[in-house]
Image (cartoon, rainbow, N blue to C red):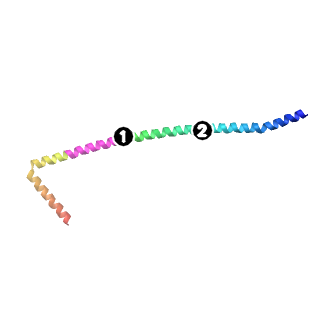
Amino acid sequence: MTDMKDVKETKAKDVPGKITSTVKEGAQSAANTVTDFASEAKDRVSQWASDATDSARQAFDSTTDAAKQAMTATSDTISNFGNEVTDMVKRYPLQAVLVGFGVGLLIGRTVRT
């Protein structure tokens, strides 16, 4: 009978150890799952950030190219206009002076009033 009592006591002493072990294993498993999930989330966010950076860089490059083209076209237009005005003044110097005088009078009258 003592042997039976010893066996029961031994089993009773083992139960808390088994429960503790099971809880530890469950907690470790949960921790591993959370770590894996966090690592995967970090990788995805990193990839999204990289994709966003690439898209922004492409948009910036595209906008820069468009601005350069617009600047070149505007510069060419202004240069052509300047050349045309210069040619007109060379062809018609007296008329150019008279037009300049007239524009000056109009501006002067407008400013005075």
Q: Quadrant of residue 53?
A: top left
Could you tell me which residue is drawn at 9 percent across and 47 percent down? 91
Q: Which residues are magenta?
A: 64-79
Side of 49 where 76 appears, left or right = left
Disc 1 residue crowd, few under 14, some 14–19, many 20+, Cα 10 Å: few
What amino acid type is highlighted by mark number 1? Asp
Callout in the foreground (2, 1):
2
Residue with the most extreme bottom position: 113
**Residue at 51% of width from left, 40% of height from top?**
45
Which residue is rendered at x = 15% and y = 59% of the image? 104
Dot 1 corresponds to which residue?
A: 61
- Residue 46 lies left or right of residue 60; in this view the side is right
The answer to the question of whether label 2 and label 1 lie on touching residues, with beta carbons closer than 8 A, is no
Q: Which residue is mark 2?
A: 35
Q: Which mark is residue 74?
A: none
Place residue 60 in its image quadrant.
Answer: top left
SS under mark 2: helix
Q: Quadrant of the N terminus?
A: top right
The spot of residue 35 in percent (x, y) is: 60, 38
- Is most of the magenta stretch helix, strand or loop? helix
Query: For the residues marked 2 and 1, what is the alpha-carbon distance in whole angstroms?
Result: 39 Å
Q: Nearer the viewer, residue 46 or 113?
A: 46
Q: Amino acid at mark 2?
A: Thr
Q: Residues within 10 Å of mark 2 (few under 14, many from 20)?
A: few
